[in-house]
Image: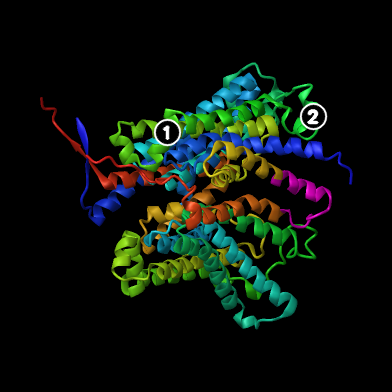
Amino acid sequence: MFKLERRMHISRKVSSIIVFLSFLLAFFVTGVLFYFLGVNVIQFYSVICSVFITPNLLIQAVFRSIPIILASLGLVVAFRMGFWNIGAEGQMYLGMVAATGIVILHVFYEAIPVSLMLAVMSAASFLAGGAWCLIPASLKAKLGVNEILTTLMLNYIAMLFVDYLVYGPWRDPEGWGFALSVPFPDYATLTLGGHPSIAGIIISVAVATLVYILFKYTKFGFVLNVLGKSSEVAKYAGMSVGRATLLGSLISGGIAGLGGFYVVSGMIGRLRPRASPGYGYTAIIVTMLAQLNPWLILPAGIFFGGLLTAGDALQSLLRLPSSAITVFQSVIFLCIVLAEFLRRYRIVLKRWKQ
Amino acid sequence: MSIEWIGPVLASTTSIGVVYLLGSLGEIYAERSGILNLGMEGTMAIGAATSFIFTITWGHTIAFLLAGVFGMLMGLLLAFFAVSLRLNQITVGLAITMLGLGLSGFITFPTIRKTVLQTLNPELPSTALETQSVPMLPPVSLSFLKEIPIIGPMLFNHNIVVYITLILAPLMWFLLFRTSIGLKIRSVGENPGMADALGINVFRIRYLTCILSGAFSALAGAYLILGFQPFWIEGMTGGRGFITLSLIILSTWNPLRAVFGSLLFGGIEVLQYRLQLFGLGATSPQFVLMLPYAIAVITLSLLSLESFRKKMSAPATLAKPYYREE
């Protein structure tokens, strides 16, 4: 017989092993599921593997992982302080809006010097994403409104707001009536070093370093960590819980906003409806897989960027829909959630005694 | 402007509203027992996709039943993770939504759908294997009642699912607020420790409501494609599962209020189309579409105010797992 026993303490090493094994379990479960759905599982996995060993595709994977990585780094801050931000998607959209707004200001009114454009755009994106996250954060801090539902609902409002802008006032007058903003001029796109992924990698590593420093070396990071463990403890320790929630979520949403900046400035070069295919939701999986560790976010993010790339290959090579990748992602998600259970409980085998 | 358009507008208000109402009926029970099912969106998509396929093979009735069964399975998955393993309902729910959206896209992908359809029913003609549309549920008009101005077209010229849903709403209100099983469900959501001490099986109740929520979400998806928009598009639920969650907040976890709320949300959607037809707000229908989400945020905030909290509030242990002291 076996019995569940609650773990009192778990070492970081055991915890990482459990998460990693659960991640592998997802490959197995997906394989079984797809086998029953009539998919050639070996071909499926070899297409996914090929993404990570073919240089061209790997570059593509890294490229597509950058918005996911940035959104995840934002979520690290939120989740560590116990703020269930599932609104990274919406915060990214606000970041896109801000970056595009600056470009439009410049194109039509020449308000900003060209040399400062990228700096101003990224700063605006950070502030817009942060401000969007401040709405649920202040509702939580002042009224105690549960942030899960509010962040979720605000995603849709942000998405519809982008629709409104590109179908309406921001539609490119020379765009043949398509719902697109004006294309970004060269000085507003991330072309450093020839490929936009180079700037993306630099931004991601820089932000990961900053998040690491925030939690490792600053007092504010410590406050956020305590807040995440227990807001009661934080209160008794005389920490200003409300202010920490607000500032922490400003940073969290801000980093996601930077991801939005990267999407329009590095990837698409203009604003269009549904510019994010759910990067903000994938980021939740990545953040949990990386166990809130900013360094692990980078490889975890690249893996999921690779899955998106594999989705295209699946379609052309195996005639499988890209939703196969969504299924795979969701199984990984479920398995990582399952890891949480194994981290909390130990399964103890017991001899049957009369 | 003539008054002619009122009838159709009211009729489609009801037919859209029923999508939300049907979905909310099960989920209200789940939330009342402390389960927040963020998997609704995906379960709805599964309901729509399976009923699309099964309608082609075996017709409406079986399609509805099977969609319900698949919804129950999704609910069971949620229950296993959230109730038995006591895992975070938010992450499990989002994962289920992702799974549902993925699977629904997968099985309806033209080549895969063709194989699925042929396996289920080898005698299908080739047109049925490729069609994106399904026959709609026939309307059953209640002849004389339909002539009543305003209420007539609004309520009495619809398909059978609409009538059943409208009758179910008060029944499920009664079950939840006037019977002992309803009291049990609500007490499990308010204070599971106390309920357990009184001999109520908290786990069994929560399993039951999870499955109920899954079934109703999938039925709402099935109704969406069979009763409202009779052709399959991947992602056709388009956030309606989440709108249903807003509806539940607006109706303060009460099936009767959900009837009015669902008509309001249905009305908002119709209004959006109509405004475009009239040339009003043609440039910004998006702001109308934002309303359900905005209403949810505002209602949640209002419900947190001290003066409201005493009268009505969210179930106390919503989205919190229950640990039995052992």
A119 left or right of B183?
A: right
Amino acid beneath label 2: Ile
Quarter placement of the N terminus of chain A:
top left
The residue that label 2 is drawn on is B148
User: How far, Cα to Cα, is label 1 from label 2?
Assistant: 38 Å
Give above or below for B227 relative to A206: above
Quarter placement of the C terminus of chain A:
top left
Which color scheme is applied? Answer: rainbow
Magenta residues, start to end:
B268-285
Number of numbered markers: 2
* Numbered circle sitting on residue A29: none
Where is residue B51? Give x, y as percent.
Answer: 60, 28
Amino acid beneath label 1: Leu
* Numbered circle sitting on residue B183: 1
Residue B320 seen by the camera? yes
Instruction: Give the structural element (helix, strand or loop) at label 1.
Output: helix
Where is residue B207? Give x, y as percent.
Answer: 40, 32
Q: Neighbour class for label 2 at 10 Å: few (<14), some, many (≥20)?
A: few
Looking at the image, tell me whether mark 1 or mark 2 is earlier in sequence order. Answer: 2
B165 left or right of A237?
A: right
Which residue does the image show at 66% across and 33% down from the upper left? B225
Residue B112 seen by the camera? no
Q: Quadrant of residue B259?
A: top right
Q: Neighbour class for label 1 at 10 Å: few (<14), some, many (≥20)?
A: some
Where is residue B178? Give x, y as percent.
Answer: 48, 30
Q: Looking at the image, which residue sits at the far left?
A: A354
Instruction: Give the structural element (helix, strand or loop) at label 2.
Output: loop
Report the front residue among B143 and A74: B143
Q: Looking at the image, which residue sits at the far right?
A: B1
Give above or below for A176 relative to A242: above
Give above or below for B114 relative to B90: above
Q: Chain under label 1?
A: B
